[in-house]
Image (cartoon, rainbow, N blue to C red):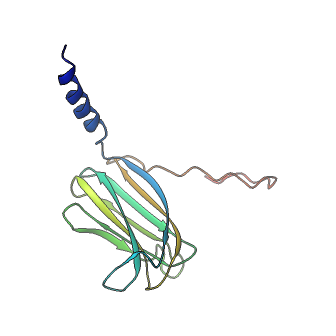
Amino acid sequence: MNRPRLVPALVALLALAGCDGAVNETHSGTLTEDDEKRPEDDSYFDTYTFRTQEGYALNVEMSSTDFDTYLMVVGPSGQEIGQNDDIVPGQNTNSRVTGEAPESGTYTVFANSYEAGQTGAYQLSIQATEPGAAPAEAPAEAPAEGSGETPSE
């Protein structure tokens, strides 16, 4: 029987199947006084990692109603992919970093507050899509019951 050879082959095949580079994650997090602080400004932060492939389109967004968000994405070799404080300065204090993955590997997202001491809940979305593919869209919100409104496209 050749079972001992079959198991490693299946493990290798499954590992390759999961390496297409596509990422579509959503995280709910909270910055607290127990989190690490960035040495540059003493702002609290959480980190998230994801794997993708060279050339994939990156879209990372962070939002909060509790504090002014700040976002930074770092590539596998330690190079900064991008950072953002406000999507629209003076109007939208949520953060977004977009770009193209310069290499395959593990990327790190730093989800933090813009100012020292800010804490609270946040939402984080991480997407990596194939070159030329449209980014995944969040499902439309259902209208409030009895509102008579339909979701906008």
Give the vertical position of 3 relative to 105 (above or below). above
Across and down, in percent, residue 106 comes to 26, 56
- Front position in the image: 23 or 46: 46
Residue 22: x, y in percent? 35, 46
Instruction: Residue at 47%, 56% (x, y): give it.
Output: 26
- Give the quarter of the figure containing the N terminus: top left
How far across and how far down the image is residue 68, in percent?
50, 79
Instruction: Tell which residue pokes out farthest to the top in this image.
Output: 1
The answer to whether 84 appears left or right of 88 in the picture is: left
Identified at 23% across, 54% down, the residue is 105
Lateral position of residue 35 relative to residue 65, left or right: left
- The part of the image, by quadrant, that contains residue 114 is bottom left
Residue at x 22%, y 60% (from the top left corner): 76
Among the 4 quarters of the image, the one containing residue 20: top left
Q: Does residue 148 sit above or below 122 in this rendering?
A: above
Q: Number of callouts in the render?
A: 0
Q: Nearer the viewer, residue 132 or 18?
A: 18
- The image position of residue 127, as x and y in percent, is 40, 54
Give the answer, above or below, for where 58 lies relative to 67. above
Q: Residue at x 29, y 60 (%)?
A: 107
